Protein backbone atom coordinates (compact mmCIF):
# COMPACT_ATOMS: atom_id res chain seq x y z
CA UNK A 1 0.00 0.00 0.00
CA UNK A 2 1.08 3.55 -0.50
CA UNK A 3 1.04 6.57 1.72
CA UNK A 4 -1.90 8.91 1.34
CA UNK A 5 0.36 11.96 1.32
CA UNK A 6 1.50 13.30 -2.03
CA UNK A 7 4.55 15.40 -2.89
CA UNK A 8 3.89 19.05 -2.16
CA UNK A 9 3.39 21.51 -4.95
CA UNK A 10 6.32 23.73 -5.80
CA UNK A 11 9.02 21.13 -5.24
CA UNK A 12 9.37 20.24 -8.91
CA UNK A 13 10.33 22.24 -11.97
CA UNK A 14 7.53 23.82 -13.96
CA UNK A 15 7.20 23.60 -17.72
CA UNK A 16 7.09 26.84 -19.68
CA UNK A 17 7.27 27.91 -23.32
CA UNK A 18 10.30 29.77 -24.63
CA UNK A 19 10.61 31.16 -28.16
CA UNK A 20 13.51 30.12 -30.38
CA UNK A 21 15.23 33.07 -32.03
CA UNK A 22 16.97 32.98 -35.41
CA UNK A 23 15.13 29.91 -36.71
CA UNK A 24 12.65 30.84 -39.43
CA UNK A 25 11.57 27.23 -39.93
CA UNK A 26 10.02 27.12 -36.49
CA UNK A 27 7.32 29.59 -37.48
CA UNK A 28 6.94 31.10 -34.05
CA UNK A 29 6.65 27.76 -32.30
CA UNK A 30 8.24 27.33 -28.90
CA UNK A 31 10.12 24.62 -27.13
CA UNK A 32 9.69 23.20 -23.68
CA UNK A 33 12.33 23.80 -21.08
CA UNK A 34 12.46 22.43 -17.57
CA UNK A 35 13.83 24.76 -14.94
CA UNK A 36 16.32 23.00 -12.67
CA UNK A 37 15.37 22.80 -9.02
CA UNK A 38 17.48 21.59 -6.14
CA UNK A 39 16.28 18.44 -4.47
CA UNK A 40 17.19 18.35 -0.81
CA UNK A 41 19.85 15.92 0.33
CA UNK A 42 18.52 13.16 2.54
CA UNK A 43 19.37 12.24 6.12
CA UNK A 44 18.48 8.54 6.19
CA UNK A 45 18.15 6.60 9.42
CA UNK A 46 18.12 2.81 9.40
CA UNK A 47 15.96 1.28 12.11
CA UNK A 48 16.65 -2.47 12.07
CA UNK A 49 14.74 -5.01 14.15
CA UNK A 50 17.34 -7.27 15.80
CA UNK A 51 14.86 -9.48 17.61
CA UNK A 52 15.53 -13.24 17.64
CA UNK A 53 13.36 -13.55 14.51
CA UNK A 54 15.96 -11.58 12.56
CA UNK A 55 18.29 -14.57 12.98
CA UNK A 56 15.92 -16.93 11.13
CA UNK A 57 17.67 -18.52 8.16
CA UNK A 58 16.49 -17.60 4.70
CA UNK A 59 16.21 -20.05 1.81
CA UNK A 60 19.87 -19.52 1.00
CA UNK A 61 21.72 -21.96 3.24
CA UNK A 62 23.60 -20.36 6.13
CA UNK A 63 22.25 -16.84 5.48
CA UNK A 64 20.00 -15.23 8.08
CA UNK A 65 17.61 -12.33 7.66
CA UNK A 66 20.07 -10.10 9.47
CA UNK A 67 22.90 -11.13 7.12
CA UNK A 68 20.74 -10.26 4.11
CA UNK A 69 19.70 -6.97 5.70
CA UNK A 70 23.36 -6.00 6.17
CA UNK A 71 24.12 -6.79 2.52
CA UNK A 72 21.06 -4.89 1.33
CA UNK A 73 22.03 -1.85 3.40
CA UNK A 74 25.55 -1.82 1.93
CA UNK A 75 24.13 -1.96 -1.59
CA UNK A 76 21.63 0.78 -0.74
CA UNK A 77 24.18 3.14 0.82
CA UNK A 78 26.68 2.75 -2.03
CA UNK A 79 23.95 3.33 -4.63
CA UNK A 80 22.58 6.36 -2.79
CA UNK A 81 26.03 7.94 -2.50
CA UNK A 82 26.66 7.42 -6.21
CA UNK A 83 23.48 9.43 -6.89
CA UNK A 84 24.27 12.19 -4.41
CA UNK A 85 27.42 12.16 -2.22
CA UNK A 86 25.76 14.63 0.17
CA UNK A 87 23.28 12.05 1.47
CA UNK A 88 23.92 11.14 5.10
CA UNK A 89 23.21 7.92 6.96
CA UNK A 90 22.81 7.15 10.63
CA UNK A 91 21.21 4.82 13.13
CA UNK A 92 20.36 7.02 16.08
CA UNK A 93 20.09 10.70 15.12
CA UNK A 94 17.16 12.51 13.54
CA UNK A 95 16.97 15.87 11.80
CA UNK A 96 13.94 17.74 10.53
CA UNK A 97 14.35 16.48 6.95
CA UNK A 98 15.12 12.84 7.62
CA UNK A 99 13.90 9.63 6.00
CA UNK A 100 13.45 6.47 7.98
CA UNK A 101 13.74 2.96 6.61
CA UNK A 102 12.20 0.54 9.08
CA UNK A 103 13.20 -3.10 8.60
CA UNK A 104 10.85 -5.19 10.74
CA UNK A 105 11.08 -8.96 11.29
CA UNK A 106 8.44 -9.89 13.86
CA UNK A 107 5.45 -11.91 12.68
CA UNK A 108 3.38 -11.88 15.89
CA UNK A 109 4.06 -8.49 17.54
CA UNK A 110 2.32 -5.39 16.25
CA UNK A 111 4.38 -2.19 16.38
CA UNK A 112 3.03 0.70 18.42
CA UNK A 113 3.91 4.36 18.00
CA UNK A 114 3.01 7.71 19.53
CA UNK A 115 3.14 10.68 17.20
CA UNK A 116 1.18 13.96 16.95
CA UNK A 117 -1.73 13.76 14.52
CA UNK A 118 -0.75 16.63 12.22
CA UNK A 119 3.04 16.58 12.59
CA UNK A 120 4.77 15.14 9.51
CA UNK A 121 8.48 15.99 9.50
CA UNK A 122 10.01 13.00 7.71
CA UNK A 123 9.22 10.14 5.36
CA UNK A 124 9.00 6.56 6.61
CA UNK A 125 9.80 3.56 4.40
CA UNK A 126 9.11 0.06 5.72
CA UNK A 127 10.64 -3.29 4.82
CA UNK A 128 8.75 -6.13 6.52
CA UNK A 129 10.25 -9.65 6.54
CA UNK A 130 7.89 -12.16 8.11
CA UNK A 131 6.98 -15.82 8.51
CA UNK A 132 4.03 -17.53 6.89
CA UNK A 133 0.66 -17.06 8.69
CA UNK A 134 0.06 -19.62 11.41
CA UNK A 135 -1.56 -20.14 14.82
CA UNK A 136 1.14 -18.07 16.53
CA UNK A 137 1.65 -15.50 13.77
CA UNK A 138 -0.43 -12.60 12.50
CA UNK A 139 1.68 -11.04 9.71
CA UNK A 140 -1.37 -9.38 8.12
CA UNK A 141 -2.25 -7.54 11.34
CA UNK A 142 1.39 -6.48 11.75
CA UNK A 143 1.48 -5.28 8.14
CA UNK A 144 -1.71 -3.25 8.60
CA UNK A 145 -0.22 -1.60 11.70
CA UNK A 146 2.94 -0.71 9.76
CA UNK A 147 0.85 0.82 6.96
CA UNK A 148 -1.06 2.92 9.49
CA UNK A 149 2.22 4.16 10.98
CA UNK A 150 3.65 4.99 7.55
CA UNK A 151 0.59 6.99 6.51
CA UNK A 152 0.43 8.73 9.88
CA UNK A 153 3.97 10.14 9.98
CA UNK A 154 5.18 10.47 6.35
CA UNK A 155 5.56 13.94 4.87
CA UNK A 156 6.10 12.66 1.32
CA UNK A 157 5.44 9.34 -0.41
CA UNK A 158 6.55 6.50 1.85
CA UNK A 159 6.87 2.96 0.49
CA UNK A 160 6.21 -0.33 2.27
CA UNK A 161 7.37 -3.74 1.06
CA UNK A 162 6.87 -7.15 2.61
CA UNK A 163 8.25 -10.60 1.95
CA UNK A 164 7.55 -14.00 3.43
CA UNK A 165 9.48 -15.91 0.77
CA UNK A 166 12.84 -15.90 2.55
CA UNK A 167 14.76 -15.01 -0.61
CA UNK A 168 17.63 -12.49 -0.32
CA UNK A 169 17.13 -11.32 -3.91
CA UNK A 170 13.58 -10.22 -3.03
CA UNK A 171 14.96 -8.06 -0.21
CA UNK A 172 17.61 -6.58 -2.52
CA UNK A 173 15.01 -5.78 -5.20
CA UNK A 174 12.75 -4.00 -2.74
CA UNK A 175 15.65 -2.04 -1.25
CA UNK A 176 16.60 -0.83 -4.73
CA UNK A 177 13.08 0.56 -5.13
CA UNK A 178 13.68 2.75 -2.07
CA UNK A 179 16.54 4.56 -3.82
CA UNK A 180 14.11 7.07 -5.31
CA UNK A 181 13.96 10.42 -3.52
CA UNK A 182 10.70 10.80 -1.52
CA UNK A 183 10.04 14.17 -3.19
CA UNK A 184 10.23 12.60 -6.65
CA UNK A 185 8.25 9.42 -6.12
CA UNK A 186 5.03 8.40 -7.78
CA UNK A 187 2.34 6.77 -5.61
CA UNK A 188 3.35 3.21 -4.79
CA UNK A 189 0.20 1.82 -6.40
CA UNK A 190 1.44 3.27 -9.71
CA UNK A 191 4.96 1.89 -9.31
CA UNK A 192 5.04 -1.37 -11.26
CA UNK A 193 8.77 -2.12 -11.04
CA UNK A 194 10.11 -4.52 -12.03
CA UNK A 195 7.65 -5.59 -14.70
CA UNK A 196 6.46 -9.20 -14.26
CA UNK A 197 7.85 -11.23 -17.15
CA UNK A 198 4.66 -13.22 -17.68
CA UNK A 199 2.58 -10.05 -17.77
CA UNK A 200 4.95 -8.44 -20.25
CA UNK A 201 4.80 -11.48 -22.53
CA UNK A 202 1.00 -11.50 -22.43
CA UNK A 203 0.83 -7.78 -23.29
CA UNK A 204 3.22 -8.29 -26.20
CA UNK A 205 1.09 -11.14 -27.55
CA UNK A 206 -2.07 -9.04 -27.30
CA UNK A 207 -0.35 -6.19 -29.11
CA UNK A 208 0.55 -8.47 -31.98
CA UNK A 209 -3.03 -9.75 -32.24
CA UNK A 210 -4.39 -6.21 -32.41
CA UNK A 211 -2.22 -5.23 -35.36
CA UNK A 212 -4.23 -4.85 -38.56
CA UNK A 213 -2.45 -5.95 -41.72
CA UNK A 214 -3.71 -4.39 -44.96
CA UNK A 215 -2.88 -6.01 -48.29
CA UNK A 216 -2.20 -3.64 -51.20
CA UNK A 217 -1.58 -6.26 -53.88
CA UNK A 218 -2.69 -5.34 -57.39
Image (cartoon, helix red, strand yellow):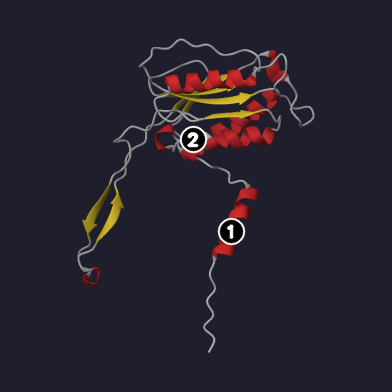
Q: Is residue 42 visible?
A: yes
Q: Percent position (x, y) of residue 156? A: 40, 29
Q: In this rendered view, identify the residue nearer to me: 162 or 209.
A: 209
**Which mark, by number, is residue 196?**
none
Q: Is residue 201 left or right of residue 85?
A: right
The residue singled out by tag 2 in the image is 188
**Secondary structure at numbered mark 2:** helix
Mark 1 or 2, which is nearer the eye?
Answer: 1
Residue 51 vs 208, above or below: the answer is: above
Q: Residue at x 59, y 63 (%)?
A: 209
Residue 14 vs 156, above or below: the answer is: below
Q: How many marks?
A: 2
Q: Is residue 182 left or right of residue 213?
A: left
Q: Residue furthest right?
A: 61
The quadrant where residue 79 appears: top right
Q: Percent position (x, y) of residue 206? A: 59, 58
Which comes before the other along the chain, label 1 or label 2? Answer: 2
Q: Residue at x 48, y 40 (%)?
A: 190
Q: Is residue 46 visible?
A: no
Q: Percent position (x, y) of residue 5? A: 40, 28
The quadrant where residue 48 appears: top right
**Which mark, by number, is residue 206?**
1
- How far is disc 1 from disc 2 in space, using C-alphas? 26 Å
Disc 2: CA contacts within 10 A as few (<14), some (14-19) or many (>=20): some
Q: Is residue 115 left or right of residue 171?
A: left
**Secondary structure at numbered mark 1:** helix
Disc 1: CA contacts within 10 A as few (<14), some (14-19) or many (>=20): few
Q: In this rendered view, identify the residue nearer to me: 10 or 139.
A: 139
Q: Residue at x 72, y 24 (%)?
A: 64
Amino acid sequence: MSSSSLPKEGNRGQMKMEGIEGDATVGGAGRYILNPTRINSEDIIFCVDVDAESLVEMKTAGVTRLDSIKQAMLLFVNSKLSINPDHRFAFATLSKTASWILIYCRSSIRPHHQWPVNQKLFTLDVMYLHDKPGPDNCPQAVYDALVDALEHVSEYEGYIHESGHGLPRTLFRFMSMLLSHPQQRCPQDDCDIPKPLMKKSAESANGEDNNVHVSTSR
